[in-house]
Image (cartoon, grey):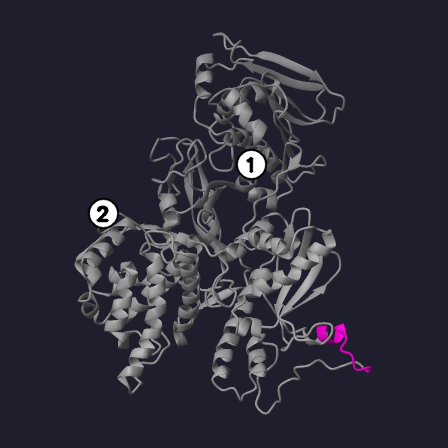
Amino acid sequence: MDITPSPRILRALGEIEFAEWQCIAELIDNAFDDFTEIMKSGKAWPGGFKVSVSLPNARGRLEDSEVLIQDTGQGMSRRSLENSVRAGWSSNDRWDKLGLFGMGFNVSTARLGNRTQVFTTQAGDPEWTGVEIDLGEIRHDFQAKDLSEAKTDLSEHGTRIIISQLKQRHAQWLQRNAAQLREVLGRIYSWILESSPVELWVGGVRVQPRKACIWGEDRYVLYGSGKNAEQIPAVIKIDQKYSAADACGQCGNWQETGTSVCQECGSEDLQTRERRIHGWLGIQRHLDKRDFGIDFLRNGRKILKFDKRIFDWTDPNDPVAGTETEYPVDLAHLGGRIVGEIHLDHVPVTYSKDAFEYSDRSWRGALDYLRGTGPLLPRSAERLGYPRNTSPLARLVEGYRRVDAGRRNLIPGDGNGPIHAQTRDWARRFWAGDPEYQTDAKWWDAVESHESRKNAEKVRAATESSPNQADEFAVLAALGAVDVAPNIAPPESTPKSSKDGQVTVQDRLDRLANSVAIPELSRTFGIPDLGILEVEAYVSALTPLTDDLGNPTPVWLKLGAGRSAKAYIDPKHQLFSQFGCTFADALLMEIAPLMKVRAQSSFSHSQIASELRITCLKDTAIDFATIKGQAHDLVLEIRTLAARQVEEEPQRAVQHLTPDERTTIENGIVSEGGQYTADVWKDGTFLMYAPPLYLVKLLESWPEAFMDGKVFRGPYSSLASPATQRLSVAKVVGYLNDLATVLTAQTTPSTAQLQRTRWSCDLLAGELCE
């Protein structure tokens, strides 16, 4: 076969920087294109659509290793085979296929190894037809060696590509990284693998599509208040069609229909084609520092994964201002949760298929539609004279930029705050295929549980000040266990007995049916060699909670089938209300002896409990990074609320700044990619970068701007006595001082200081207005 280019050119192609997965993907693309043709034709295909990739044996010798890619496609004629291995030749049009430029085969095979054999056959052919491209043997006559192989079944069809004499670096990577290769390909081809009958196998294991872990389409948040309140769904469908246009098959230029030649290159190869942006934008069920952003696809293959440039904005009226990242801004250190899958089949891509042609008008038009032409953030738009941005992305940023736990922001919590570490673990279970985590029910239960427990805490605080009230009923009402209605007596606190006077297990279980789940403690508890226990934890709907003998207990562990158990926890037990023990501590007291007995272990109860805490409850650790992150989140929320309160009189706040604090604010604006101007002092924006201790000083100096439900719940103006006013402010100042101390610490604080800061975070969060 005449493959024409000089062997030196073929070897040079192998030096183009393609990662190992890109080389494999280029060859898979060709097979998927063949499958697409078959499916479009509508003809039956009994053999199915399957691509298999065999990798070098991890224990084999490198010199004997090879890569095999085979498919069940139509196969090729000898003439088509000759063309397909010739560098630069392509029968594919620019728009409908994954294989675009006619170089992918040569680049990927030459990149991986020095010898490539291709065998292909069509149904009914008497043999397999092949060619061998050996970069060490091909001379300047450009002739490649013909191959043939007998067929055992005339109905066989498809193509096999065998790459041998692998280059050492690539062979070693392929030997060690089969799982990683499957993961990458599962991301790249997720839409194809999920929406078509195509199968992809690597190393004998089927590649699973990497699905998005997003909230259900029926979930939403309310943005705004009163008549301006708006429902913003967690998933926004995108389907924007533009008028058809002529596309040039030679240079890729788009132009209006009605001309006979391309206005860019003069070619007459014009096709009238559809232009459409479709897919979805949505909210992930967890925050992640890296895995968020938008996936952009072309013909079903992901070109960009978790792309974040859509969150950046440059003011066209101020070209020297630089680029501003508009999401995530609040709590950016936690990451983001806006994701999406957008198909741009009409937008050209680079030869390496890892980027679009960003200078192309169709790419810029797609971004303008998805994110709008102005700032995403309402305050920024108003400040710069732009109308409110109503693009799909701007709506999601408005509705979901904050990450406070609860329904308002669709964030799971534990009654005190968000449980980000737990939701990330649930996402890993989602991707692992655990059936319990495929829907968003687990996450939603944690949102609802947070709201119920938060309300119960408010009721508890209120009833403690009125000890004669039936506070048990109030707590149950706040938890949602009973309905609140006037003139209805509270339920009995003790379960009814059976006929012989004994309280049966079923009696208690019936009364506990309305208990509220504790998602952060509902997990697998386990230690190697001691086994596991799958626990579902609940805040008990009964108080006092009793054990099997009728004695009050903080925790009742009801064992179920296999290694399962339900744990009911009485929040009113004095262990929690008077001695400050946590639910987790009490639960471990119950689990540790159970595991010891079951495993007949020599470990002490404290050894087992401590190992369970370290292994299974890492997110409860009192460590500097965790507490500092919690304090940072809360202070950022306080800054956001406070900035709104000083908008009308910003100079009153500015006058309390020292020169060092002004410098800190200016440096903070610049370090976050913003442009410092004198305008930052003309509204409350500067507070977003103010040092924490300045917030303490400002609160003490100007309490009427922030108390009375404006930022903090506590009363001020309504209090008659100056001493009482000072006391109300001092309570909030004390908590805020603890947070500021940790945030500005140069060395790691003591465990006691960190524990105190954690409590202050919880207490200060309760002081914030809604």
What residue do we see at 50% from left, 56% from top? Answer: 621
Tag nearer the camera, 1 or 2: 1
Q: Residue 744, labelled with which disc? A: none
Asked whether residue 326 appears in the rendered view, the answer is: yes
Residue 73's image quarter? top right
Asked whether residue 392 appears in the rendered view, the answer is: no
Residue 115's image quarter? top right
**Residue closest to the eye, 294 or 273:** 294
The residue pinned by badge 2 equals 319
- Residue 144 image point, x, y percent: 55, 12
Total count of labels: 2
Stretch in magenta: 499-509
Is residue 151 left or right of 305 when viewed as pictured? right
* Quarter occupied by the C terminus: bottom left
- Residue 185 image point, x, y percent: 55, 37
The residue pinned by badge 1 equals 180
Which amino acid is tagged 1?
Answer: Gln
In reply to whether residue 504 is colored magenta, the answer given is: yes
